[in-house]
Amino acid sequence: MAVESLRVGGLVPLTSIDYPGELAAVVFTQGCPWRCVYCHNPELLPARGETEIPWQQIVDFMHSRRGLLDAVVFSGGEPTFQSALPQAIEQIRSMGFKIGLHSAGIYPRKLQTLLPLIDWIGLDIKTTKNNYQLITRTKDSGNAAWQSAELVIASGISHQLRITAHPSWLADSDAQWIRQRLLDMGAESVVIQAGSLQFHS
C-alpha cells in the first residue's frame, strides 16, 4: 500500500499533552469501524472524509518542524484502520521524530506488527470485556481491546492505558476495577479520564 494513500482528516501542529513529556504534532487519520456512543470525532468515522489533507503536505510540514518538535502522534478515527499506516510511520521516523500512537485496540494483529515501529502508545480501554458491545455497538470488540492491552503490556513499549469514565456508561467503581486489573497485568501507566476529557482515539 503506497504511503500517499493514507487518508488524513486533520492535523494539530503542536501539542504537549498527546505524547507525555514530548512536544508533538498529531495526525488524525480517517476511518473507524466502531460506532462508540460517545465518540468525540464523528467526522473521522467514515473511511473517506469530506476534507482530507494530502499525505505529502504532512511530510512537508514535518520537514519544517525538524529540531522544533520531538514526535508525531497518529490518532483518529482508528489509525490501524488504514493499511498505509506502517509506511507513514516509517517515513516520519526516518526524519528523526519519535512515533506515538493513539488506538482503541480494534485490530490486535495489526497492532502487534506496529509495536516495533513506535515509541509510545496510548491505548483506550472503554469498559469490561463483556460490556464493550454496549459502547462500541460492535460484536467481539471487548476481546479485541483487551487482547491489544495484553500485547502492549507484553511489548515493553512505553504506554498509557486510558479508561474513559463516561458517567452514563461506566460507573466509578467499574473504572477502578478495570484500572486495578490492568495494573495487575503489568501496565506501566493507567489513567481514568472523564468522558468530556477523552483523548482523540
Image (cartoon, rainbow, N blue to C red):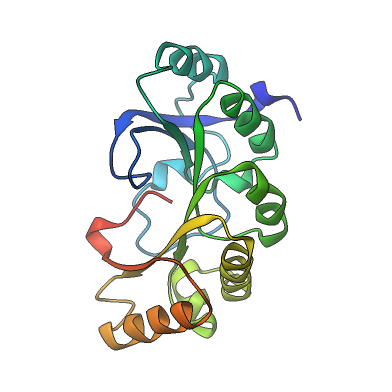
Residue for point 27% across, 64% down: 195
Left or right position of 128 against 84: left
**As rendered, which of 154 and 150 lies closer to the eye?**
154
* Residue 129 point in image, percent of width and height: 53, 81
* Residue 12 point in image, percent of width and height: 34, 30
**As rendered, which of 51 and 78 lies closer to the eye?**
78
**As rendered, which of 37 and 153 lies closer to the eye?**
153
Residue that extends furthest to the right in the rendered view of this protein:
1
Residue for point 48% across, 25% down: 52
Residue for point 38% across, 44% down: 19
| Residue 165 higher or lower than 116, as above or below | below
Q: Quadrant of the N terminus?
A: top right
* Residue 103 point in image, percent of width and height: 51, 53
Residue for point 33% across, 33% down: 23
| Residue 191 higher or lower than 39, as above or below | below
Q: How many marks?
A: 0
**As rendered, which of 159 and 25 lies closer to the eye?**
159
| Residue 103 higher or lower than 163, as above or below | above
Q: Quadrant of residue 144?
A: bottom right
* Residue 100 point in image, percent of width and height: 49, 43
